[in-house]
Amino acid sequence: MPIDAQTLISRMEWAAAQGLTEFMFHDGRTRVTIRRAAGVCRTTEPKTVPSARAIEAKDVVTAPLGGICHLASEPGGAPFVTEGATIEAGHPICVIEAMKVMTTVPAPRGGVVGVVMVSDGATVEAGTPLVRIR
């Protein structure tokens, strides 16, 4: 499914509401990186942000630590999760490599994977959104 304008806008709004300065996502073929310039600040938030933030906070799985995010168990292998896949609690979402230690990130609950928000091999920080589970 190609990235459409509405998807791009909603993800940009979500990234800004979270205070992120950089945000990457992809649809399998297209990778988009959004960077906010230093010194840019929002003095007021749109009225829809609190409810969107509450929904997103509940649905988004974030990185527990910083490192390199691997979406498959081996290079070129099948990804742990794909958009639209139904998963159960505990299902591996990704592996984060930090100082040569591999940490598996499990799904906190079951559901349908709505969107994978990082690309394979991306450097993530603790709190970086990884996937959205509906």
Image: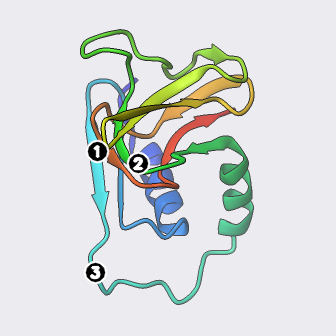
User: Do tag 1 and tag 3 residues touch (Cβ < 8 Å)?
Assistant: no
Taking the image as shown, residue 42 lies to the left or right of residue 30, namely right
Looking at marks 1 and 2 on the same chain, the residue that comes earlier in the sequence is marked by 2
Q: Secondary structure at mark 3?
A: loop
Q: In this rendering, which labeled residue sits more in front, label 1 or label 3?
A: 3
Quadrant where the N terminus sits is top left
Taking the image as shown, residue 92 lies to the left or right of residue 6, namely right
Residue at 30% over, 14% down:
74
Q: Which residue is mark 3?
A: 38
User: Do tag 1 and tag 2 residues touch (Cβ < 8 Å)?
Assistant: yes
Circle 2 packing at 10 Å, graded few (<14), some (14-19), many (20+), is some
Q: Secondary structure at mark 1?
A: strand
Say which of 51 and 20 sits in front: 20
Residue 101: horizontal and vertical position, in percent? 38, 35
Marks 1 and 3, how far apart at CA: 19 Å
Say which of 102 and 42 sits in front: 102
Q: Which residue is mark 1?
A: 32
Q: Which residue is mark 2?
A: 8
Q: Quadrant of residue 118?
A: top left
Q: In this rendering, which labeled residue sits more in front, label 1 or label 2?
A: 1
